[in-house]
Amino acid sequence: MATTNTMVWRYIVLLLMIYTSSTDEITKLITISDSLMNSVPDYSRFFTVDELFNHSRVVAFTHPNLVKYQNVGYSRNGEAIPMLSIGNGSKSLLLYACPHPNEPIGSLLVDFLLDALFEHIDLLEAYTWHLLPCVDPDGTRLNEGWFSGPFTIRNYAQYFYRPRTEEQVEWTFPIVHKNYSWSTPSNETQALMNAIQFTQPDFVYGLHNSGFGGMYYYISQPLSDIFPELEQLPSTLGLFLAKGEAESPWVTQFAPAIFSPLSLRNAYDYYEKYTHIDPVSMMSGGGTSFDYLEEIGLNNTIFLMAELPYFQSPVVANDTIIPNRTERDVLLQGLDKDDESLFQCFN
């Protein structure tokens, strides 16, 4: 697990370089980055919600002059959702963990930063760090059965929980687009909305991760200068870059495995253009956090998501074109295999 957090931290550093004006400052940032990357613990498990929140309170108590601790909202079950603001720099950075409760990799990064940032005062003078250790505590608690392992697909599936789209943090932001509207954010989404409003971030990092396959990214701007390193970084840490198609056909591919963010607006427009069905009938839930940034006028905010898998395969790095096979053929073959699996399950 140290590898995944090392990667996630490295992505942050790449984005921070965009805000850095001088060569000396970039050199200093790289030095700090290397120090932090070398100090990431070799985690053997994921932390529980209680552990994440208890650590947050301890950090706030230990550094009262440097940390502002506030609850930005409450979960459906009434649990407070804390945010810690650290530093007083001119650039506002917002990182939120567990936006999907079965995706806790980012919570390890936030937990790490809650200690590591205080060892590098330069990071606190240049940036203000707004950290949410867990934005969906109710759902995350329901996943804790697999947080200590064994880290097998069977154990992961046995204790897996993920709410339906209409209840997810990342997919219930209020939005109006053409004939579709959504106005009922979940409690947890409202908390994240409050955090965004409070912080007015220059950079937002939604700490998602994937379940299977390989590494890929979503980024709101075509920052081509950093794309080569984003492409190369997984291989330096024994991970695979997912070179296949995007999760959704309405995103733009900037480079291999680097895409524009998922967006309800783009999904609607895609269905409107390529189908003869009313797009409203094909939509569910609300907007994404990226949609919300645009909704409130934060169009220049850099939005990033890095999808790191629990279970990976080298096959995802193979982008060889299969001759005489269309995408339709491959999808139909996949559906046939699904039918075979279901038949075996029920017979």
Image (cartoon, rainbow, N blue to C red):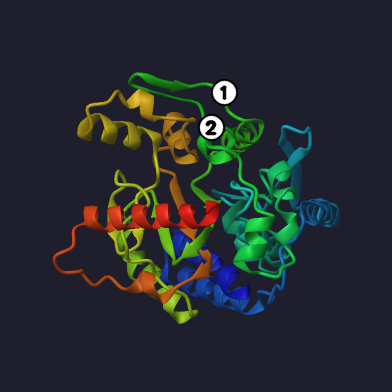
Does residue 214 appear to the left or right of 116 in the view shown? left
Mark 1 and mark 2 residues within 8 Å of each other at the beta carbon? yes
Q: Return the disc, 1 or 2, that comes first in the chain's sequence.
A: 2
The kind of secondary structure element at disc 1 is loop
Displayed quadrant of residue 111: bottom right
Quadrant of the image for the N terminus? bottom right
Which residue is at 75% across, 53% downward? 66
Residues 325 and 146: in front is 325
Which residue is at 48% across, 52% downward? 342
**Amino acid at dot 2:** Thr
In this view, 160 is above or below 262 = below
Displayed quadrant of residue 192: top right
Furthest-left residue in this view = 324
**Which disc is residue 169 wearing?**
none
Neighbourhood count class around disc 1 (C-alpha, 10 Å): few under 14, some 14–19, many 20 upward: some
Furthest-front residue in this view = 347
In this view, 76 is above or below 4 = above
Number of marks: 2
x and y, in percent, of residue 34 in the image? 56, 78
Displayed quadrant of residue 20: bottom left
x and y, in percent, of residue 225 in the image? 32, 65
Work out whether residue 207 can be spotted. no
Furthest-top residue in this view = 179
Work out whether residue 35 can be spotted. yes
Does residue 333 appear to the left or right of 343 in the view shown? left
**Amino acid at dot 1:** Thr
x and y, in percent, of residue 45 in the image? 72, 68
The Cα atoms of the two marked residues, 1 and 2, are separated by 7 Å
The kind of secondary structure element at disc 2 is loop
Check disc 2 and report the residue beneath it. Answer: 172
**Which disc is residue 184 wearing?**
1
